[in-house]
Image: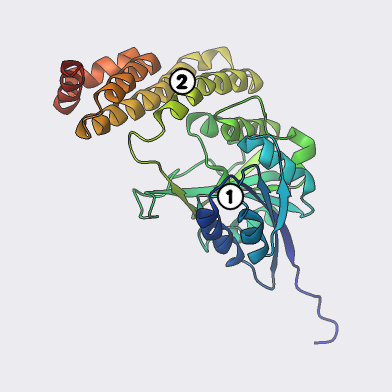
Amino acid sequence: MPGMAEPRVERVSVIVPTRDRTALLQESLASIRRLEGPDLHLEIIVCDNGSDSETPRVAEQFHARYLRSERAGMSIARNVAMQAATGDYLAFLDDDDVWLPTHLRPHLRLLAQQPELIGVVGQIINTNLDLQSMGDPWPVDAPRNGELFDALLEYMPQLGATVVRASARQIIGYFDESLAGDEDWDWHLRLAAAGRVGFVQIPCMLFRQRPPGDADDMQHQRMPFTRKVFLRNVRRGRRRPQDRVRLLRVYLRHAGCWCGHFLTSATAHVQRNEWSAARRALLWAVEASPAHALWAVVHDARMRRTVLMAIGHH
């Protein structure tokens, strides 16, 4: 009708790093395009540092901008795409994950309602490789006052459920390319230390999990970066002295998660008669947290069997 204002169209740049996974990339890009509508324009930017000649064709199929980075690394690919983004907001999706139809709009509404927020995080659903759910959405809840630093220190958010204002590039910068692991956790913590971050209690994405025993070497290479990111951001968050006991508990919980990961991996290797891999996983579990490893062996009969079988086969 004459005199009525045109409906606002939100412009979101979606950052998608990829490397030689065209079938999965198709799923990811399709899930992004399904969210588009008259109120939402999505600029998809695919940054490729792989060698699959089909990747540009897949990007073109979904009308995505295609960029290349000759250097490998998720942070590098994300940074190249972020530098090229022209939207008012930035969102992210790795090439093996999938957005749900409930993503983006709740984040954008909250950002419009609370202009002091620099970004918004949502919930994640872990899945197996076939995108079948492996549990309830997480995190179950988070503070609603914008003070998310402490919460994000305790759990590692998944970047695919986060939307930030484009100004975040100037406020906190880009992903740290020196980190070979937990670079997205580091970026989230820098975000929460610099400004207020909102939370929507809505599942936003499906997060594929590797099966137990898969890519142990890569996970072991990533493990030291958890400690590095935790310590550097504790200092950045200017924690008070009386918080030290809680911070120690939080750090030990992260170490225990790594220990549990490798103990589960060891059990999977034993079930497949992969004795050398099982012993290596057990050693890495002890490296991650001797106390958690000992507790598991003492209290879990299945884990005792895993250890005995791994040691007994040479």
* Secondary element at image label 2: helix
**Residue found at x 37% / y 18%:** 284
Q: Position of residue 158 (x, y in %)?
A: 53, 42
**Residue found at x 60% / y 41%:** 145
Q: CA distance from mark 1 to mark 2?
A: 27 Å
Give, as a three-letter code, the residue at label 2. Tyr
Q: Name the colouring of the figure.
A: rainbow
Report whether 194 appears left or right of 129.
right
Q: Position of residue 81 (x, y in %)?
A: 72, 46
Give, as a three-letter code, the residue at label 1. Leu
Q: Is residue 171 above or below residue 98?
A: above
The numbered dot on residue 93 is 1
In the picture, residue 260 is in which quadrant?
top left
Question: Neighbour class for label 2 at 10 Å: few (<14), some, many (≥20)?
Answer: some
Question: Neighbour class for label 1 at 10 Å: few (<14), some, many (≥20)?
Answer: many
Q: Position of residue 56 (x, y in %)?
A: 66, 56
Q: Position of residue 35 (x, y in %)?
A: 59, 65
Instruction: Quickly name the residue at label 2.
Output: 251
In the picture, residue 2 is in which quadrant?
bottom right
